[in-house]
Amino acid sequence: MKPICFASIVLVLAGCTTPGVVQLSPDTYLISRTDEAGIFGNASKMKTDAIRDANSFAASQGKIAIPISSTFTPMVEVVAHNLASFDYEFRVVSKDDPEAKRTSLIPSPTLIETKETISSDVHTKNDTVSKPDLYSELTKLDDLRKKGIITNEEFGSEKKKLLAKSHAEPQG
């Protein structure tokens, strides 16, 4: 029983693997961390340690670390050996470099999958909106006149408006 407890404590204390600082270009570097402690790991500590190591690396050169990007991959308990990891990319610049005044971390893209149905009513320029044709409108006016709802004069006036409107509209 004691060897198993001791092994568990060593695993927890070992925590993250630290492959060191990797140079990507003359002033750009990457620090990667993998939390091998599994469910006993501490993602925040892993991230903090990586950023602290980047700052220490830059300070050892008399410069400062400017964050470029970071990527965090959480541990997935379902899949064996898929441990949490953190990649931190940074530039090392002098303290009077203009980039030193503008420090911001570019967030890594996050994929959020949702399942929902979205409906929309989309019309394009060529869609024909159901507008009544001239014949239908004239027929409706004639019905109103025959039923005594409008007078002959009102029918004539409305008919002229419809005819003028139909000649003014562009033909599709």
Image (spheres, rainbow, N blue to C red):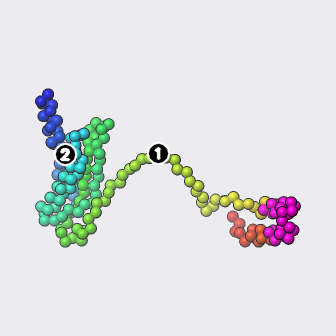
Q: Could you tell me what secondary structure mostly forms the magenta stretch?
A: helix
Where is residue 19 drawn, in percent x and y? 18, 49
Q: Secondary structure at mark 1?
A: loop
Q: Say whether disc 1 or disc 2 marks the residue closer to the N-terminus.
A: 2
The correct choice, above or below, for 101 with respect to 116 in the image is below
Pointer 2 residue: 16
Amino acid under disc 2: Cys
User: Which region shows up in magenta?
Assistant: 137-159
The verdict on residue 120 being magenta is: no
Pointer 1 residue: 115
Question: In the shown orientation, is residue 143 left or right of residue 12?
Answer: right
The quadrant in which residue 82 appears is top left
The correct choice, above or below, for 58 with respect to 44 in the image is below
Quadrant containing the N terminus is top left
Question: Which of the pair 28/43 is nearer the observer?
Answer: 43
Which residue is at a point 64% across and 59% down the rendered structure image?
127
The quadrant in which residue 24 appears is bottom left
Quadrant containing the C terminus is bottom right
